[in-house]
Image: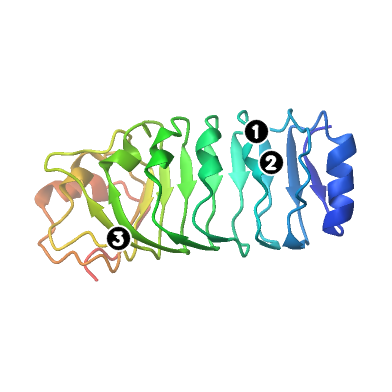
Amino acid sequence: MNWNHLTGRPAVVGFFMAYVVDALTGVGVVGQTGPIPSSPYNITSLREIDLSRNDLGLPIPEWLFNHKDLTNLNLGYNHFGGPIPGGIVNMTSLSFLDISHNQFIGTLPETIGQLKMLTVLDISYNSFEGVVSEVHFAHLASLEYFIARASSFTLKTRQGWFPPSNLRTLALDSWHLGPEFPMWLQRQTQLLGLSLSNTGISATIPTWFSNISSHLWFCLPLLL
């Protein structure tokens, strides 16, 4: 059995997951409300979990973070809240992580930078705040899509720092980046999408930016 989309009450879905998913590689759940079943299912074959666009809330059970071979985790568009669960750092095979459009709060844990396989990270539309530093990106050399709109993060890095990856999409709307133009963008020559509105940037756009903007598919206002 490969991908399945489960419907019905959480208890029914839980029964199915507990007894017949040994061979599953991916599972998606639709039309759910309330908490995720908390039983410690033995689903060692899972590689992808998609719980997006449900009405799920706390608590997030610990078993969800015990799958070290999981490559895709989508929790977007739910009602999860509180800090980002610390167990995410154990999911060292993750290449896709989407926790957008929830009610997470607090800071972005530095341990997110240990997820070396990440290519897509979407944390948009939560209630995050605090400082993001180069430590958060230290080992994210494979990151291609970083979408982090609508959070009150302040980016603080040392002079001369450049991200370790070449991004294709970067969205940091509502971050505190200004007033100077971010020099680390200079090496992001693979960008296809850029969105930096409402980030406090007030400096003149440097001439080198034309090397980036010439191949952008979209570029939302930078100086708003």
Which element is circle 2 on?
helix
x and y percentages locating residue 116 in the rendered image: 43, 30
Q: For marks 2 and 1, give the one nearer the viewer.
A: 2
Which element is circle 1 on?
loop
Mark 2 touching mark 3, by CB under 8 A? Answer: no
Mark 2 and mark 3 lie on one chain; the one further toward the N terminus is 2
x and y percentages locating residue 169 in the rendered image: 39, 48
Q: Say which of 214 and 73 sits in front.
A: 73
x and y percentages locating residue 139 in the rendered image: 36, 31
Q: Which mark is residue 196?
A: 3
Q: Say which of 114 and 190 sits in front.
A: 114
> Which residue corresponds to mark 1?
67
**Which quadrant of the figure has residue 187?**
top left
Vertical comparison of 173 with 36: above or below? below
Mark 3 touching mark 1, by CB under 8 A? Answer: no
Mark 2 → mark 1, Cα distance in angstroms: 8 Å
Q: For marks 3 and 1, give the one nearer the viewer.
A: 1
Q: Residue sitting at 20 percent across and 46 percent down?
A: 157
Three-letter amino acid code of the residue under disc 1: His
Three-letter amino acid code of the residue under disc 2: Trp
Q: Is residue 52 left or right of residue 219?
A: right
Q: How is the image coloured?
A: rainbow
Q: Is residue 150 left or right of residue 58?
A: left
Three-letter amino acid code of the residue under disc 3: Leu
Mark 2 touching mark 1, by CB under 8 A? Answer: no
| Within-10-Å neighbours for mark 3: few <14, some 14–19, many 20+ | many
- Report if residue 183 is visible in the image: yes
> Which residue corresponds to mark 2?
63
